[in-house]
Amino acid sequence: MNPPVIAPSILSADFARLAEAAAAVEGAADWLHVDVMDNHFVPNLTIGLPVVQSLRRATTIPLDCHLMITDPRRWAVGYAEAGCEYVTFHAEACDDPVALARDLRAAGARAGLAVDRDTPVEPYLELLPHLDMLLVMTIKAGFGGQEFLPELLDKVRTARRRVEAGHLQVRIEVDGGINAETIEAAAEAGADAFVAGSAVYGAEDPAEAVRRLRARVRPQLRAGS
Ligand code: DX5
Ligand code: ZN
């Protein structure tokens, strides 16, 4: 299993001060999770490509871009070209995830596929060899600050079994309601990337909040991994 990564979500930061939000977790966070919402795929609107391009120039932290948009085949490659390390699009919004993953990789990014709360993971397991990450929502996508839904960890367990059985280099990321109380259950289920919005940017010291989250998942590391 890969070492765990912690990805603070800027959805819970001050959108007028994104550079400061990035700086606040520099040196502590592995990735910065960037939630792009289009008010169509989800009933919320955040930022788009120009802001992501600016953010890319404002920080050296790898950007973990989570596209909650319709028609990702039209837009997602732009985020890869903008220099995002990971570009994740939703299974519910894409009829050919393998083709889009290929395009994202060709544009220099790693490709992630997200499954929302009500989407089963089973139909997508066979696509894992074509992906770099599977994002399992642990809430309904759209808003930060929602309560973690532990029953969705069954999808993480299922995916982890498939990743191990196939000796795949695919990360499994959880997103939604991750905090000091919930992160251990997610790690035990097999997640190795953890998005945290309100738990990081709602804290007085965001970098310290990241370090606390990491300390909670370190014991999950298996010897030799
Ligand atoms: C919601 C976003 C999440 C959100 C998580 O749809 O995808 O990344 O920022 O926020 P918390 O950690 O507060 O649930
Ligand atoms: Zn997200």
Image (cartoon, helix red, strand yellow):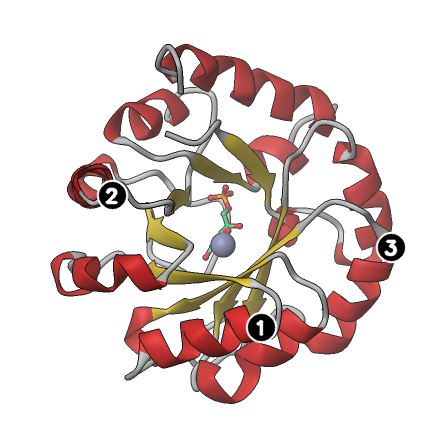
- Can you give x and y, in whole percent of width and height, for residue 144 in the image? 50, 50
Please name whichever residue, 162 or 41, is drawn nearer the observer in this view of the structure. 162
Q: Quadrant of the N terminus?
A: top left
Label 1 neighbourhood size at 10 Å, few (<14), some (14-19), many (20+)?
Answer: some
- Can you give x and y, in whole percent of width and height, for residue 116 in the image? 30, 60
Does residue 116 appear in the picture of this structure? no
At a point 35% along the width and 35% down the height, the residue shown is 191
Give how far apart the Cα atoms at labels 3 and 1 are. 22 Å
Which of discs 3 and 2 lies nearer the camera? The answer is 2
Label 1 sits on residue: 45
Label 3 neighbourhood size at 10 Å, few (<14), some (14-19), many (20+)?
Answer: some
Left or right, 24 with respect to 134, comes to right
Label 3 sits on residue: 58
**Up/down of 35 relative to 80, above or below:** above
Left or right, 44 with respect to 224, comes to right
Q: Quadrant of the C terminus?
A: top left
Q: Give the structural element (helix, strand or loop) at label 1.
A: loop
At a point 83% along the width and 39% down the height, the residue shown is 23
- Can you give x and y, in whole percent of width and height, for residue 118 in the image? 20, 61
**Up/down of 217 relative to 47, above or below:** above
Does residue 179 appear in the picture of this structure? yes
Label 2 sits on residue: 163
| Nearer-N-terminus badge (3/1) | 1
Amino acid type of the residue tagged 3 in the rendering: Ala
Corner quadrant of residue 224:
top left
